[in-house]
Amino acid sequence: MRIKLFFLLHLYFVFFLGFSFVVSSQTAKDTLVASQYFKKADSLLLNKKFENSISNFQNALSIYEKTGAWEKVAACHNKISENHWRHVALKKALQSAKKALEISTTKLLPNNIYEARPDNADL
């Protein structure tokens, strides 16, 4: 009886460890793809190709949301906001900035780099 119990516990442990490896491996692949979208979008932003940049940031954003990479989600919203701001779509820029702030205050630790604070403003 003890041998069966030991064997079952050992089998569950091995199964759980294997399952965890597969899940973390898939998350790493997903975030690698998201990182590529983010880098391409950032380059497009520098070259003033705003529409394509926003599209790539949105692709990265959806992957980061699925994986729970909330700091990256906030970064994508900030970059989308910057795209809209540079393209003089100020209402859309404000909407994206508000989303970044919401993620920052609900999902990230206090005083993170994406949190807007008056004492950090360059006035």
Image (cartoon, helix red, strand yellow):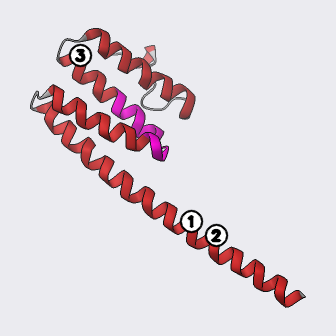
Name the residue type under label 1.
Ser
Q: 6 or 71: which is nearer to us?
A: 6
Which quadrant would the C terminus be assigned to in this image? Answer: top left
Q: Identify the magenta region.
A: 65-77
Which quadrant would the N terminus be assigned to in this image? Answer: bottom right
Name the residue type under label 3.
Trp
Q: Secondary structure at mark 2?
A: helix
Callout 2 environment at 10 Å: few (<14), some (14 to 19), or many (20+)?
Answer: few
Q: Is residue 16 above or below residue 122?
A: below
Q: Which residue is mark 1?
A: 20
Q: Is the C-beta separation of discs 2 and 3 under 8 Å?
A: no
Q: CA distance from mark 1 to mark 2?
A: 6 Å
Q: CA distance from mark 2 to mark 3?
A: 47 Å
x and y, in percent, of residue 117 in the image? 46, 18
* Residue sitting at the far left: 47
Q: Quadrant of residue 29?
A: bottom left
Q: Quadrant of residue 61?
A: top left
Look at discs 1 and 3 and give the one toward the viewer: 1
Name the residue type under label 2.
Phe
Q: Secondary structure at mark 3?
A: helix
Q: Which residue is mark 3?
A: 85
x and y, in percent, of residue 77 in the image? 36, 28
Residue 123 visible: no
Q: Which residue corresponds to the image point at 37% horizontal and 51% vertical from the top-left?
A: 31
Q: Is residue 4 above or below residue 50?
A: below
x and y, in percent, of residue 114 in the image? 42, 29
Q: 109 or 37: which is nearer to us?
A: 37
Q: Which residue is mark 2?
A: 16
Q: Is the C-beta separation of discs 1 and 3 under 8 Å?
A: no
Q: Which residue corresponds to the image point at 56% horizontal and 65% vertical from the top-left?
A: 20
